[in-house]
Amino acid sequence: LDAKIGDKRWVFTTPVEPNRLTAPAVAGDTVYVVGQHPSQSPTVWALATLDGSVRWREELGGETAGPPVVTDGHLYCVTTNDGLYAVDTAEEGVAWQQSLTPSVGPPAATADGVFVGTRDGVVCYDSDGSRRWRVAATTALTRPHDGPVLDETRLYTAGPDGNSVVALEAETGEEQWR
């Protein structure tokens, strides 16, 4: 849609069912969306914001568990069964993948790390795919839209009882408060 007047600028039609698309992520002049056809793996589409043309697409594994997050040249997407994918947006391909069982999307990310909630804790990976830290028994994330959120220094997530919030130091994973 045109942001000033609300007119439709373009439409991108994917070969997936409408309820199988994630919310989009935007970085620069590109819109990223993940979709899954019932008989195929999830696919990331990179679309030009100007006209909706497909810049590239990349197939992932598993089933989509949440919308992508884009930061500093990487798109991060969590899929069930296969875990966390990092897609290099310049090279147009999977940079790395980490198995997370059970993973619950979507991730939160900074330029130097990505944070993923699971049913049994939170894990942080550096942008190169190496694990920085993992904190067990800190979350009660159970639904595809559940995921941690960030501010400048802290990561916030649902507590293990499902009725509280836990604040973790983003750099170390150390619990700040509950």
Image: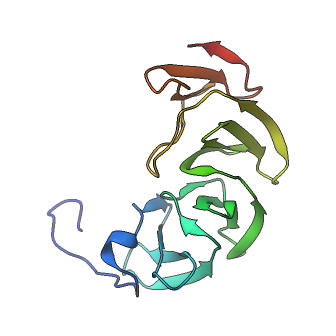
Q: Residue furthest front?
A: 161
* 101 to 94, vertically: above or below: above
**Place of residue 25 in the rendered image (x, y in percent of width and height, measured from the top left):** 46, 59
Residue at 43 percent across and 22 percent down: it is: 163
Going by the image, does 161 lie left or right of 129? left
Would residue 153 appear left or right of 113 to someone viewing this image? left
Q: Is 175 displayed left or right of 164 in the figure?
A: right
Picture quadrant where residue 118 is located = top right
Q: How is the image coloured?
A: rainbow
Residue 50: % across, % down: 38, 76
129 to 55, vertically: above or below:
above
Q: Nearer the viewer, residue 71 or 5?
A: 71
Residue 67 vertical placement versus 30 (above, below):
above
Residue located 57% across and 81% down the image: 57
Label count reads 0
| Residue located at (71% from left, 53% from top) | 100
Looking at the image, residue 46 lies above or below residue 54: above
The C terminus, quarter of image = top right
Residue 3 is drawn in which quadrant?
Answer: bottom left
Percent across and percent down for residue 79 are 59, 62
Q: Residue 10 appears in which quarter of the rendering? A: bottom left
Could you tell me which residue is drawn at 73 percent across and 30 percent down? Answer: 135
* Residue ranking furthest to the right: 130
Looking at the rendering, in which quadrant would you find the N terminus? bottom left
The x and y percentages for residue 89 are 65, 68
Left or right: residue 72 versus residue 22 is right
